[in-house]
Amino acid sequence: MALTLNDRLPIPHKNAEVKNVTCEFCIVGCGYKSYKWPLGTEGTYKDNALGIDLSQQQPTYGDWCSERMFNTITDRDGKKYNLMVIPDKTCVVNVGQNSVRGGMMGVSTFNVASATRDRLKEPQVFRGGMLMESSWEEATTIIAKVYKKIIDNDGADEISHKTFDHGGGGGGFENTWGTGKLFHSAIGTTSASIHNRPAYNSEVHSSREMGVGELNSSYYDTSISDTMLVIGCNPYECQTNLFNIHMQANLDGSTLEDKKREYDKGESLSKGKIIFIDPRRTASITNSIAIAGKENVLHLQIKPAQDITLMNALVSYIIEQGWEAKEFIKNHTENFDAMVKVNKVSLEYASSITNISVADIKKAAEWIAKPKPSGHRPRNAIYYEKGIIWGIKNYENVASIVNLGLVTHSVGRVGTGICRAGGHQEGYTRPEYHGPSRQNLAVIDTDIIQGKYLVYSIWGTNPFGQSIATQRLRNAVNKRSQIVKDAINGYHGNNLDELCDIIYNACKSGGLFVVDIDIYPTQSSERAHIVLPAATTMEMNLTSMSGERRLRLSEKIMDAPGSAKPDCLIAADIANALKAEYLKAGNKTMAKRFEGFEWKNEEDSFKDGFAGQGSKMASQGGPTGTLATYKLLRDAGNNGVQLPIVKVENGKLIGTRLNYADGKFGTKSGRATFLPTPQPAMPKQVAKQVKRYKYWVNSGRINEVWQSNYHTGRLEFTAKRWPMAPLEIHPNDAKELGVTSGDIVQLSNDYGSTRAIAIVTDAVRKGEVFGAFGFQNSIINDLCTDYVDPDTKIPFYKGTAANIVKVGRSEGLIKDMTFLERA
Ligand SMILES: Nc1nc2c(c(=O)[nH]1)N[C@H]1C(S)=C(S)[C@@H](COP(=O)(O)OP(=O)(O)OC[C@H]3O[C@@H](n4cnc5c(=O)[nH]c(N)nc54)[C@H](O)[C@@H]3O)O[C@H]1N2
Ligand SMILES: Nc1nc2c(c(=O)[nH]1)N[C@H]1C(S)=C(S)[C@@H](COP(=O)(O)OP(=O)(O)OC[C@H]3O[C@@H](n4cnc5c(=O)[nH]c(N)nc54)[C@H](O)[C@@H]3O)O[C@H]1N2
Ligand code: SF4
Ligand SMILES: [Mo]
């Protein structure tokens, strides 16, 4: 690739400021160290902050720094610094390794002279036909005046919002608490939705209802399991160091000593095996074979959306063989017979539905449940993620996996787990949501298309590229936002009461008032009337927990650009502005609802939320979160503490490696509950697309690109590597379409049309394509239907259909791409 590389980077001065940073990207939450020292100063080869002799060749995974781990930054006082963000070898999660994403934390920080220079710096207000710089006071007063008018005249539910529910990516317990307190208890709207789905719900309703919190194990336990079962999840590309460190160590046998120590006496020990259930051959599968050999890797190349049948068949066959965990089922579960009655299916039937041979289903069942030579039950680390969560029917999809896990006692035991592999880190702590039950939740993005609500507040997310039926959503919001823009354009004065009346009246005539809080200009800010600039990771202190519930404090190391603020303090500003408006109107009762936001910094939000109340959710650490303080977490460093916290001992937080080790589950009875999970039919919206259009369209992630491509689409390395969304197409389909790798193709169906760059590969089956999501210049979600699971309101992002035609080829566009096999 034609990249401009520096031939040397400055060496951190021995007095560099060193801090702990948790990777801001995926759920794994690798530990990093930041080094910050004044520009123009440097350490020497022998005398530097790293404490190593740099005149010597360093090992592959050493303390060296790549160009992407480095940046030059400017604090608000104008002082300039060198900044290096490198993986921490003392962190047990990543032991000094980074992934291609984590390794870009340095270069993705704000730098006035680099690709991140267009970070949002000041509040903006739509006036005179464009977004214009404003003050925090004016911007939040406009929001407050419009919201107040709506709350008073139409009710708070007319204020709809879509708000990030993250741990990493700038979220953290601080920001979910701030935004949650603003919307749930102060404004009091129930028209809520989360950044990655159109309603306010859980991704794992059924698992929680079965009594099994979704993050119940630890990466160490995965590394000492007998069998890893990975369903609808691509850990090499998406949870990279879970795969590269912990799964790999199990596959290559380097944890055999740990197994010996941790297992029962006399229990058979062997290298780990791994089973993947995925409609396509992923890089995780290819890499596993390279590490462990074909004989230890099983790929069940399932027909999309048929996982429930496969899980039911595995459970049925295991019971038929008498391999189920009888004692555990008897003493710690309920509803087993009812589940078996509904779920019983034969291997032959399952094979015909799933496209997997009877022999392979049997082999999987043996790896998961057949007693080992020593007579002990295999220890399974079961992971599932978006191929399941965003699948045909979220509720049964997840429940059918938990059934399998319970039947084989794969939870609460050393070397086991039934877990989400996870997305970004978690940081949920919010006041209770008072909306309707899960079956009756509002589907916000669909409602917006249908003309509902007066406000759409978009916070730390970009629904126009990542939600359902996105082309329809963009078109609907274009029209509705324009009604408000036109009204604003007709007003040339600057009396805020007059302006807000005009905005309100435009909303009442079909308009939509759009407020966007982000770190970059996006498709959301294009449609917004108010845009507020947020600070993000490394620009504020943030706490979050990882996929193994590891809570850390990621420290502030630099100032945010311009006058950007932490999201929790933006929420506080909006609440305080509303309080002021109500006090001005003499309405003390309403003003009271907006009290409790007198926060000076993000730690105040942490103290009020997570450390003040703990988390309502056991899966987020439960009530003992109150034991956490910034000081204790700072002392705990990058290894932090695994939630729930048990106690504080000699100034150290003591946590929990494995949940449910006592056999008590999160139901009223304390028993885990099996659920009947019949295979559902294809939803009618999707069935219609399948009938009309030739290719099944699956979607998901690629290693180098992070989410909506907000950093990665700007940085040279990734932007050139992936200039548009790649689309994997089978060679036979490609031949029929006259397409070769690198061609631009167009996909279309009833919901919209989009484009992508063809990658011809037999990693996908004939008739099925896989498109990368998140690209803002080629949006695969334009093809997504508006179907949501009626029981959970969770969408089916992974399933739609489209026709494909070749558009042409642009050599300039693809000159820095590689078309070598990825999997
Ligand atoms: N087809 C398809 N669609 C999908 C999925 C799929 O698998 N297939 N997956 C879904 C899933 S799991 C997810 S998580 C979503 C992701 O979809 P989004 O939530 O839309 O994506 P992100 O890029 O994580 O976040 C969006 C915005 O947050 C901003 N941001 C970053 N840090 C901060 C911060 O500190 N503060 C603020 N205020 N803003 C910040 C970024 O600039 C960006 O504009 O997509 C969903 N959509
Ligand atoms: N590189 C990178 N890593 C990321 C992210 C990113 O944007 N980029 N985002 C993070 C976030 S927020 C999330 S939620 C996670 C998501 O992490 P993953 O869920 O691991 O990633 P995806 O690629 O969305 O989907 C996983 C797999 O589901 C498969 N799949 C599709 N349909 C089916 C089906 O019917 N059955 C089965 N069994 N499998 C199916 C797809 O082929 C795909 O390989 O990744 C996190 N990590
Ligand atoms: S594996 Fe995830 S957490 Fe670790 S460095 Fe990569 S993106 Fe960051
Ligand atoms: Mo996600």
Image (cartoon, helix red, strand yellow):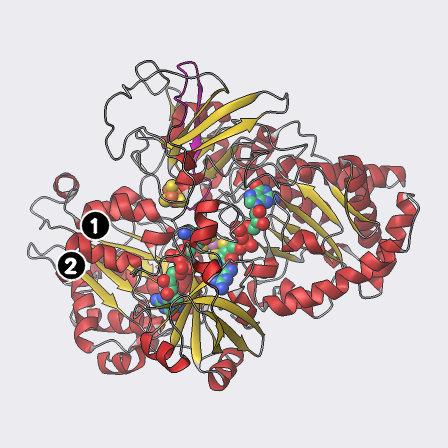
Residue position marked by numbered label 2 in the rendering: 296
* 76 in magenta: no
Residue situated in front as seen by the camera: 327 or 689:
689
Label 1 and label 2: CA atoms lie apart by 13 Å
Q: Residue furthest bottom?
A: 691
Q: Majority secondary structure of the magenta segment?
A: loop
Residue position marked by numbered label 1 in the rendering: 225
Q: For numbered disc 2, what is the local secondary structure?
A: helix
Q: Which residue is painted at 27% across and 83% down in the image? A: 352
Q: Is residue 277 left or right of residue 628?
A: left
Q: Position of residue 418 (x, y in %)?
A: 32, 55
Q: Are marks 1 and 2 in contact (CB under 8 Å)?
A: no
Q: For numbered disc 1, what is the local secondary structure?
A: loop
The quarter of the displayed image where residue 246 is located: top left
Residue situated in front as seen by the camera: 279 or 130:
130
Residue situated in front as seen by the camera: 336 or 93:
93
**Within 8 Å of ligand 2, the CB of disc 2?**
no
Q: Which residue is painted at 33% across and 32% down in the image? A: 91
Inspect the image, locate mark 2, and give the three-letter code of the amino acid beneath it.
Asn
Q: Position of residue 822 (x, y in %)?
A: 31, 59
Inspect the image, locate mark 1, and give the three-letter code of the amino acid beneath it.
Ser
The quarter of the displayed image where residue 699 is located: bottom left
Vertical relation: 650 (above or below) 762: above
* 17 in magenta: yes
Question: How many other residues sit within 10 Å of disc 2, few (<14), some (14-19) or many (≥20)?
Answer: some
- Quarter of the image that includes the C terminus: bottom left
The quarter of the displayed image where residue 333 is located: bottom left
Front of the two marks 1 and 2: 2
Q: Position of residue 56 (x, y in %)?
A: 23, 22
Vertical relation: 789 (above or below) 628: below
Vertical relation: 733 (above or below) 113: below
Region of the chain picked out in magenta, as a range: 9-28
